[in-house]
Amino acid sequence: MSMAGNLRKVTSLGGVGGLRKVARLARRRPRVDLSHPARSPLGSSVVNCVTYREGVRIPERGDLVDTVERVRKSREGFVWLGLHEPTDQEFAGIAELFDLHPLAVEDAIEAHQRPKLERYGETLFAVFKTVCYVEHEELTATSEVVNTGEIMVFVGADFVITVRHGRHGSLGPLREELESDPGQLAKGPSAVLHALADHVVDDFLTVTDAVQADIDQVETDVFSETGARADPGRIYQLKRELLELKRAVVPLSRPLEDLATRPIRAVDPEIQAYFRDVSDHLLRAKEQIAAFDELLNSILQAHLAQVTVAQNEDMRKITAWAAIVAVPTMVCGVYGMNFDHMPELHWRYGYGMVIGVISVACLALYRGFRRSGWL
Protein backbone atom coordinates (compact mmCIF):
# COMPACT_ATOMS: atom_id res chain seq x y z
CA MET A 1 0.00 0.00 0.00
CA SER A 2 1.28 3.51 -0.81
CA MET A 3 2.28 6.04 1.84
CA ALA A 4 -0.72 8.19 0.94
CA GLY A 5 -2.96 5.15 1.42
CA ASN A 6 -1.45 4.53 4.84
CA LEU A 7 -2.05 8.14 5.80
CA ARG A 8 -5.70 7.94 4.75
CA LYS A 9 -6.21 5.11 7.27
CA VAL A 10 -5.16 7.22 10.24
CA THR A 11 -8.58 8.63 11.03
CA SER A 12 -10.42 5.35 10.63
CA LEU A 13 -7.91 3.42 12.75
CA GLY A 14 -8.08 6.11 15.45
CA GLY A 15 -5.63 7.71 17.84
CA VAL A 16 -2.10 6.63 18.64
CA GLY A 17 -3.05 3.00 18.12
CA GLY A 18 -4.01 3.88 14.57
CA LEU A 19 -0.69 5.59 14.05
CA ARG A 20 1.13 2.51 15.32
CA LYS A 21 -0.80 0.27 12.98
CA VAL A 22 0.00 2.54 10.04
CA ALA A 23 3.62 2.53 11.11
CA ARG A 24 3.62 -1.31 11.13
CA LEU A 25 2.17 -1.25 7.62
CA ALA A 26 4.91 1.13 6.54
CA ARG A 27 7.63 -1.17 7.97
CA ARG A 28 6.76 -3.84 5.40
CA ARG A 29 8.52 -1.76 2.73
CA PRO A 30 11.93 0.01 2.73
CA ARG A 31 12.22 3.28 4.61
CA VAL A 32 12.37 6.50 2.59
CA ASP A 33 13.93 9.70 3.90
CA LEU A 34 11.16 12.28 3.75
CA SER A 35 13.60 15.16 3.69
CA HIS A 36 14.73 14.14 0.20
CA PRO A 37 12.12 15.74 -2.10
CA ALA A 38 12.89 13.66 -5.18
CA ARG A 39 12.37 10.38 -3.28
CA SER A 40 9.53 11.43 -1.00
CA PRO A 41 6.59 8.98 -1.08
CA LEU A 42 4.32 12.04 -0.85
CA GLY A 43 5.71 13.45 -4.09
CA SER A 44 8.30 16.06 -5.00
CA SER A 45 6.27 18.80 -3.32
CA VAL A 46 7.72 17.84 0.09
CA VAL A 47 10.67 20.14 0.64
CA ASN A 48 11.65 19.12 4.16
CA CYS A 49 10.41 17.36 7.29
CA VAL A 50 12.29 18.13 10.50
CA THR A 51 11.70 17.45 14.20
CA TYR A 52 12.74 20.00 16.82
CA ARG A 53 13.08 19.28 20.51
CA GLU A 54 13.97 22.08 22.96
CA GLY A 55 14.84 24.22 19.95
CA VAL A 56 17.36 21.74 18.58
CA ARG A 57 17.01 19.86 15.31
CA ILE A 58 16.66 16.09 15.90
CA PRO A 59 17.92 13.73 13.19
CA GLU A 60 14.98 11.63 12.01
CA ARG A 61 14.82 8.71 9.67
CA GLY A 62 11.72 6.98 8.46
CA ASP A 63 8.40 8.14 7.14
CA LEU A 64 6.18 10.95 8.29
CA VAL A 65 3.85 8.72 10.31
CA ASP A 66 6.70 7.38 12.44
CA THR A 67 8.05 10.89 12.97
CA VAL A 68 4.70 12.26 14.15
CA GLU A 69 4.11 9.21 16.36
CA ARG A 70 7.43 9.68 18.16
CA VAL A 71 6.75 13.38 18.78
CA ARG A 72 3.25 12.74 20.11
CA LYS A 73 4.35 9.84 22.27
CA SER A 74 7.15 11.87 23.88
CA ARG A 75 4.96 15.03 24.08
CA GLU A 76 8.09 17.06 23.45
CA GLY A 77 9.05 19.13 20.46
CA PHE A 78 7.23 19.54 17.18
CA VAL A 79 7.43 18.62 13.51
CA TRP A 80 7.99 21.19 10.77
CA LEU A 81 6.81 19.95 7.38
CA GLY A 82 7.51 22.15 4.37
CA LEU A 83 5.77 21.72 1.00
CA HIS A 84 5.81 23.55 -2.31
CA GLU A 85 2.65 23.66 -4.45
CA PRO A 86 1.29 20.22 -3.46
CA THR A 87 -1.49 18.50 -5.41
CA ASP A 88 -4.70 17.08 -3.94
CA GLN A 89 -3.26 13.56 -3.90
CA GLU A 90 0.01 14.66 -2.29
CA PHE A 91 -1.77 16.59 0.47
CA ALA A 92 -4.59 14.15 1.20
CA GLY A 93 -2.60 11.90 3.52
CA ILE A 94 -1.06 14.85 5.38
CA ALA A 95 -4.48 16.42 5.91
CA GLU A 96 -5.80 13.22 7.52
CA LEU A 97 -2.70 12.65 9.62
CA PHE A 98 -2.83 16.12 11.17
CA ASP A 99 -6.67 16.37 11.12
CA LEU A 100 -6.71 19.54 9.02
CA HIS A 101 -10.01 21.18 8.16
CA PRO A 102 -11.15 20.59 4.54
CA LEU A 103 -11.73 24.30 3.92
CA ALA A 104 -8.21 25.18 5.02
CA VAL A 105 -6.81 22.32 2.94
CA GLU A 106 -8.67 23.61 -0.12
CA ASP A 107 -7.26 27.10 0.40
CA ALA A 108 -3.73 25.73 0.83
CA ILE A 109 -3.88 23.73 -2.41
CA GLU A 110 -5.62 26.23 -4.67
CA ALA A 111 -3.80 29.34 -3.39
CA HIS A 112 -4.78 32.82 -4.67
CA GLN A 113 -6.06 33.74 -1.21
CA ARG A 114 -5.98 37.08 0.55
CA PRO A 115 -3.95 37.32 3.80
CA LYS A 116 -6.03 36.01 6.68
CA LEU A 117 -6.01 34.14 9.99
CA GLU A 118 -8.54 31.42 10.82
CA ARG A 119 -8.95 28.94 13.68
CA TYR A 120 -10.22 25.42 13.14
CA GLY A 121 -10.44 23.74 16.54
CA GLU A 122 -6.92 23.46 17.93
CA THR A 123 -5.31 24.31 14.59
CA LEU A 124 -4.43 27.80 13.41
CA PHE A 125 -4.40 28.54 9.67
CA ALA A 126 -2.67 31.65 8.35
CA VAL A 127 -2.17 32.96 4.81
CA PHE A 128 0.65 35.35 3.92
CA LYS A 129 1.26 37.05 0.58
CA THR A 130 4.95 37.07 -0.32
CA VAL A 131 6.47 39.71 -2.58
CA CYS A 132 9.79 40.20 -4.34
CA TYR A 133 11.23 43.00 -6.44
CA VAL A 134 11.88 42.16 -10.09
CA GLU A 135 15.18 43.67 -11.19
CA HIS A 136 15.15 45.58 -14.50
CA GLU A 137 17.66 47.77 -16.30
CA GLU A 138 15.09 50.37 -17.32
CA LEU A 139 11.50 50.86 -16.26
CA THR A 140 9.10 50.64 -19.21
CA ALA A 141 5.33 50.64 -19.61
CA THR A 142 5.38 46.80 -19.51
CA SER A 143 8.06 46.17 -16.87
CA GLU A 144 7.18 43.76 -14.07
CA VAL A 145 8.17 45.42 -10.83
CA VAL A 146 6.58 43.28 -8.09
CA ASN A 147 6.15 39.51 -8.15
CA THR A 148 3.84 37.89 -5.59
CA GLY A 149 3.44 34.44 -4.10
CA GLU A 150 1.82 32.86 -1.04
CA ILE A 151 2.72 30.98 2.10
CA MET A 152 0.04 29.04 3.98
CA VAL A 153 0.81 27.95 7.54
CA PHE A 154 -0.92 25.31 9.66
CA VAL A 155 0.03 25.59 13.34
CA GLY A 156 -0.89 22.97 15.91
CA ALA A 157 0.32 21.95 19.33
CA ASP A 158 3.08 19.74 17.93
CA PHE A 159 3.39 20.61 14.24
CA VAL A 160 3.91 23.36 11.72
CA ILE A 161 3.04 22.83 8.06
CA THR A 162 4.14 25.45 5.55
CA VAL A 163 2.77 25.38 2.01
CA ARG A 164 4.54 27.70 -0.39
CA HIS A 165 3.25 28.88 -3.77
CA GLY A 166 5.33 30.86 -6.24
CA ARG A 167 8.84 30.90 -7.62
CA HIS A 168 10.33 32.91 -4.77
CA GLY A 169 10.12 33.00 -0.99
CA SER A 170 12.28 29.99 -0.14
CA LEU A 171 12.20 29.25 3.59
CA GLY A 172 15.61 27.59 3.74
CA PRO A 173 17.45 30.70 5.04
CA LEU A 174 14.66 31.32 7.54
CA ARG A 175 14.95 27.76 8.86
CA GLU A 176 18.71 28.17 9.29
CA GLU A 177 18.22 31.48 11.09
CA LEU A 178 15.73 29.91 13.49
CA GLU A 179 17.99 26.95 14.16
CA SER A 180 20.75 29.36 15.17
CA ASP A 181 18.51 30.58 18.03
CA PRO A 182 17.38 27.44 19.93
CA GLY A 183 15.96 29.52 22.77
CA GLN A 184 13.41 31.13 20.49
CA LEU A 185 12.67 27.93 18.59
CA ALA A 186 12.08 26.11 21.89
CA LYS A 187 8.91 28.18 22.39
CA GLY A 188 7.17 25.91 19.91
CA PRO A 189 5.32 26.16 16.60
CA SER A 190 4.20 29.73 17.28
CA ALA A 191 7.85 30.80 17.14
CA VAL A 192 7.96 29.53 13.55
CA LEU A 193 4.74 31.40 12.78
CA HIS A 194 6.24 34.62 14.13
CA ALA A 195 9.45 34.11 12.15
CA LEU A 196 7.43 33.61 8.97
CA ALA A 197 5.36 36.74 9.56
CA ASP A 198 8.48 38.75 10.35
CA HIS A 199 10.21 37.40 7.22
CA VAL A 200 7.25 38.32 5.01
CA VAL A 201 6.91 41.83 6.42
CA ASP A 202 10.66 42.47 6.11
CA ASP A 203 10.33 41.58 2.43
CA PHE A 204 7.54 44.17 2.18
CA LEU A 205 9.91 46.86 3.44
CA THR A 206 12.69 45.72 1.11
CA VAL A 207 10.38 45.89 -1.90
CA THR A 208 8.96 49.29 -0.96
CA ASP A 209 12.51 50.69 -0.75
CA ALA A 210 13.26 49.32 -4.23
CA VAL A 211 9.99 50.67 -5.64
CA GLN A 212 10.84 54.09 -4.22
CA ALA A 213 13.95 54.16 -6.41
CA ASP A 214 11.78 53.60 -9.50
CA ILE A 215 9.35 56.32 -8.42
CA ASP A 216 12.24 58.75 -7.82
CA GLN A 217 13.54 58.05 -11.34
CA VAL A 218 10.13 58.66 -12.90
CA GLU A 219 9.74 61.87 -10.88
CA THR A 220 13.13 63.10 -12.08
CA ASP A 221 12.25 62.37 -15.71
CA VAL A 222 8.86 64.07 -15.49
CA PHE A 223 10.27 67.30 -14.02
CA SER A 224 13.19 67.47 -16.43
CA GLU A 225 13.27 69.85 -19.42
CA THR A 226 11.87 67.10 -21.65
CA GLY A 227 9.30 66.00 -19.05
CA ALA A 228 6.37 66.55 -21.41
CA ARG A 229 7.79 63.84 -23.66
CA ALA A 230 8.06 61.28 -20.81
CA ASP A 231 6.10 58.06 -21.26
CA PRO A 232 3.00 58.17 -19.00
CA GLY A 233 2.73 54.39 -19.36
CA ARG A 234 5.55 54.01 -16.83
CA ILE A 235 3.51 55.89 -14.24
CA TYR A 236 0.46 53.70 -14.83
CA GLN A 237 2.63 50.58 -14.68
CA LEU A 238 4.03 51.64 -11.31
CA LYS A 239 0.51 52.25 -10.03
CA ARG A 240 -0.56 48.76 -11.17
CA GLU A 241 2.44 47.14 -9.51
CA LEU A 242 1.84 49.22 -6.39
CA LEU A 243 -1.70 47.87 -6.31
CA GLU A 244 -0.31 44.31 -6.25
CA LEU A 245 1.87 45.28 -3.31
CA LYS A 246 -1.07 46.90 -1.55
CA ARG A 247 -3.14 43.70 -1.89
CA ALA A 248 -0.40 41.81 -0.08
CA VAL A 249 0.22 44.34 2.69
CA VAL A 250 -3.05 45.96 3.69
CA PRO A 251 -5.20 42.85 4.49
CA LEU A 252 -2.46 41.50 6.77
CA SER A 253 -3.13 44.16 9.42
CA ARG A 254 -6.10 42.39 10.99
CA PRO A 255 -4.45 38.93 11.29
CA LEU A 256 -1.34 40.42 12.90
CA GLU A 257 -3.48 42.44 15.29
CA ASP A 258 -5.30 39.27 16.34
CA LEU A 259 -2.03 37.42 16.85
CA ALA A 260 -0.63 40.28 18.91
CA THR A 261 -3.61 41.04 21.14
CA ARG A 262 -6.07 38.14 21.31
CA PRO A 263 -5.35 35.04 23.40
CA ILE A 264 -4.93 32.10 21.01
CA ARG A 265 -4.20 28.63 22.35
CA ALA A 266 -1.79 27.77 19.54
CA VAL A 267 0.30 30.91 20.20
CA ASP A 268 2.69 31.12 23.13
CA PRO A 269 1.91 34.25 25.24
CA GLU A 270 5.59 35.23 25.10
CA ILE A 271 5.43 35.27 21.30
CA GLN A 272 2.58 37.79 21.19
CA ALA A 273 4.95 40.65 22.06
CA TYR A 274 6.99 39.75 18.99
CA PHE A 275 3.89 39.92 16.82
CA ARG A 276 3.32 43.49 18.01
CA ASP A 277 6.75 44.38 16.68
CA VAL A 278 5.89 42.79 13.31
CA SER A 279 2.64 44.75 13.28
CA ASP A 280 4.59 48.00 13.74
CA HIS A 281 6.80 47.13 10.76
CA LEU A 282 3.72 46.37 8.70
CA LEU A 283 2.28 49.78 9.59
CA ARG A 284 5.43 51.40 8.25
CA ALA A 285 5.08 49.48 4.97
CA LYS A 286 1.41 50.53 4.69
CA GLU A 287 2.29 54.18 5.23
CA GLN A 288 5.00 54.01 2.58
CA ILE A 289 2.65 52.45 0.05
CA ALA A 290 -0.03 55.07 0.74
CA ALA A 291 2.57 57.83 0.32
CA PHE A 292 3.76 56.26 -2.95
CA ASP A 293 0.21 56.15 -4.25
CA GLU A 294 -0.32 59.83 -3.51
CA LEU A 295 3.06 60.73 -4.98
CA LEU A 296 2.33 58.87 -8.22
CA ASN A 297 -1.01 60.66 -8.49
CA SER A 298 0.81 63.99 -8.11
CA ILE A 299 3.45 62.99 -10.66
CA LEU A 300 0.75 61.95 -13.13
CA GLN A 301 -1.14 65.23 -12.67
CA ALA A 302 2.09 67.20 -13.07
CA HIS A 303 2.90 65.31 -16.26
CA LEU A 304 -0.57 65.97 -17.70
CA ALA A 305 -0.21 69.68 -16.82
CA GLN A 306 3.17 69.77 -18.56
CA VAL A 307 1.67 68.15 -21.66
CA THR A 308 -1.16 70.72 -21.64
CA VAL A 309 1.30 73.62 -21.32
CA ALA A 310 3.46 72.22 -24.13
CA GLN A 311 0.42 71.85 -26.35
CA ASN A 312 -0.64 75.44 -25.62
CA GLU A 313 2.85 76.69 -26.51
CA ASP A 314 2.78 74.74 -29.75
CA MET A 315 -0.64 76.14 -30.61
CA ARG A 316 0.55 79.72 -29.99
CA LYS A 317 3.55 79.20 -32.23
CA ILE A 318 1.38 77.71 -34.96
CA THR A 319 -1.08 80.62 -34.66
CA ALA A 320 1.71 83.23 -34.79
CA TRP A 321 3.30 81.72 -37.89
CA ALA A 322 -0.11 81.38 -39.53
CA ALA A 323 -0.70 85.12 -38.95
CA ILE A 324 2.70 85.98 -40.47
CA VAL A 325 2.14 83.76 -43.50
CA ALA A 326 -1.35 85.28 -43.98
CA VAL A 327 0.15 88.65 -45.09
CA PRO A 328 1.97 87.44 -48.25
CA THR A 329 -0.87 85.01 -48.92
CA MET A 330 -3.41 87.84 -48.96
CA VAL A 331 -1.30 90.19 -51.11
CA CYS A 332 -0.38 87.46 -53.58
CA GLY A 333 -4.02 86.41 -53.69
CA VAL A 334 -5.12 89.93 -54.63
CA TYR A 335 -2.51 90.38 -57.35
CA GLY A 336 -3.16 86.91 -58.67
CA MET A 337 -6.71 87.79 -59.81
CA ASN A 338 -5.44 88.90 -63.30
CA PHE A 339 -7.40 92.16 -63.62
CA ASP A 340 -6.07 94.71 -66.12
CA HIS A 341 -6.75 97.75 -64.02
CA MET A 342 -5.04 97.27 -60.65
CA PRO A 343 -3.01 99.78 -58.58
CA GLU A 344 0.65 99.91 -59.61
CA LEU A 345 0.19 96.88 -61.88
CA HIS A 346 2.13 98.39 -64.81
CA TRP A 347 4.53 100.48 -62.70
CA ARG A 348 8.20 99.63 -63.12
CA TYR A 349 8.84 99.49 -59.37
CA GLY A 350 5.50 97.91 -58.44
CA TYR A 351 6.95 94.42 -57.84
CA GLY A 352 9.67 95.67 -55.53
CA MET A 353 7.23 97.81 -53.63
CA VAL A 354 4.89 94.88 -53.00
CA ILE A 355 7.75 92.65 -51.84
CA GLY A 356 8.94 95.42 -49.52
CA VAL A 357 5.49 95.95 -48.03
CA ILE A 358 5.12 92.19 -47.45
CA SER A 359 8.54 91.97 -45.80
CA VAL A 360 7.96 94.94 -43.51
CA ALA A 361 4.53 93.63 -42.46
CA CYS A 362 5.86 90.12 -41.75
CA LEU A 363 8.84 91.51 -39.80
CA ALA A 364 6.57 93.71 -37.69
CA LEU A 365 4.31 90.76 -36.88
CA TYR A 366 7.29 88.54 -36.04
CA ARG A 367 8.75 91.10 -33.61
CA GLY A 368 5.36 91.58 -32.01
CA PHE A 369 4.88 87.86 -31.43
CA ARG A 370 8.42 87.53 -30.07
CA ARG A 371 7.81 90.27 -27.54
CA SER A 372 4.59 88.63 -26.36
CA GLY A 373 6.31 85.22 -25.99
CA TRP A 374 4.40 83.47 -28.73
CA LEU A 375 7.56 82.78 -30.72
Image (cartoon, rainbow, N blue to C red):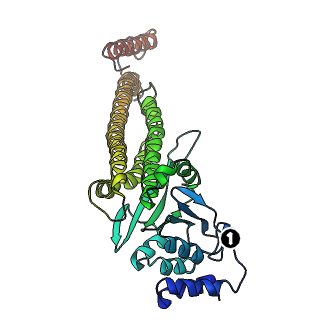
> Splitting the image into 4 quarters, where does residue 361 fall?
top left
Quarter occupied by the C terminus: top left
Figure disc tally: 1
Mark yes or no: residue 101 visible: yes
Residue placed farthest to the left in the image?
A: 262
> Splitting the image into 4 quarters, where does residue 2 fall?
bottom right
Q: Residues within 10 Å of mark 1 (few under 14, many from 20)?
A: some
Q: Nearer the viewer, residue 222 or 340?
A: 222
Three-letter amino acid code of the residue under disc 1:
Asp
Left or right side of 246 for 46: right
| Callout 1 secondary element | loop
Left or right side of 115 for 63: right
**Image position, residue 158 (x, y; %):** 46, 68
Q: Nearer the viewer, residue 159 or 201?
A: 159
Quarter occupied by the N terminus: bottom right
Residue placed farthest to the top in the image?
A: 349
Q: Please report the residue visible at 51 percent of the width from the left and 49 percent of the height from the top.
A: 132
Q: Is residue 356 above or below residue 64?
A: above
Left or right side of 82 for 252: left
Q: Nearer the viewer, residue 33 or 67?
A: 67
Q: Please report the residue visible at 52 percent of the width from the left and 55 percent of the height from the top.
A: 55
Residue placed farthest to the right in the image?
A: 30
Q: Is residue 6 above or below residue 207?
A: below
**Image position, residue 165 (x, y; %):** 52, 63
Q: Please report the residue visible at 45 percent of the width from the left and 61 percent of the height from the top.
A: 189
**Image position, residue 225 (x, y; %):** 44, 24
| Label 1 sits on residue | 33
**Image position, residue 100 (x, y; %):** 43, 76
Mark yes or no: residue 340 visible: no
Q: Please report the residue visible at 70 percent of the width from the left and 77 percent of the height from the top.
A: 31
